[in-house]
Image: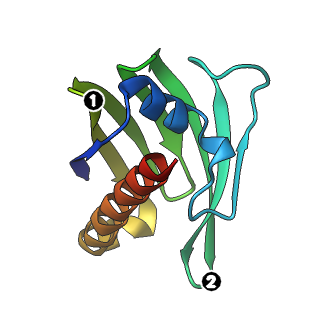
Amino acid sequence: MYFELSITIRRPPLEVFTFLRDKDKHPRGVLLLEKVTPGEPGVGTLYREVVQMMPFVREEILSVITRFDPDEYLDENFEGAGFKGHLAYQFLQEDDRTRLIQRETMFARGLLKVFEPLIKRMFCRHLQERLEAIKAILESA
């Protein structure tokens, strides 16, 4: 499954980058989000998340930063029991705003492969709502 979304945020690229870099300080819609690797975030930093996938299904997701170019790119690979993938953020300066582009590739495993069409529809809506929430948080700061 491939997703590409974008949103314009009235903040400079470095501010948007920093917010997403420090995701453990701004957990949104997850049960747990922690930075496992000590020190400042960078390539190799590991995060652990626990998310509620369905009413009685929790999923642990491990992600690692694979590209770290302040105010330009932030990429990570992630993996859970039923899927793995790659998430890439690109930050483009547009006057006093940032065009945030999110590209995500996700591969379902096992039984989840059967539900890919449904997962894709639900996940795409979730990703757009998440970008809008990030915009609202950053613009209200």
Check disc 1: other Cα within 10 Å, few if <14, some if 14-19, many if 20+: few
At x 51% / y 41%, what residue is drawn?
78
Name the kind of residue labelled 1 in the image: Asp
Outermost residue on the right side: it is: 38
Q: What is the image's colouring?
A: rainbow
The spot of residue 63 in percent (x, y) is 57, 38
Residue 82: x %, y % from top left: 50, 59
In the rendered image, the vertical position of residue 65 relative to residue 61, given as above or below: above
Which numbered tag is attached to residue 140? Answer: none
Q: Quadrant of residue 21?
A: top right
Of residues 113 and 71, which is closer to you in this image?
71
Q: Which residue is mark 2?
A: 56
Q: Is residue 16 visible?
A: yes
Sequence-wise, the earlier of marks 1 and 2 is 2
> Which residue is more in the foreground, 46 or 117?
46
Going by the numbered disc 2, the residue's amino acid type is Phe
Please report the residue visible at 24 percent of the width from the left and 50 percent of the height from the top: 3
Displayed quadrant of residue 62:
top right
Tell me the distance, in whole angstroms, between the alpha carbons under discs 1 and 2.
44 Å
Dot 1: element: loop
The x, y position of residue 91, in whole percent, is: 31, 28
Vertical comparison of 53 with 82: above or below: below
Give the residue at mark 1.
96
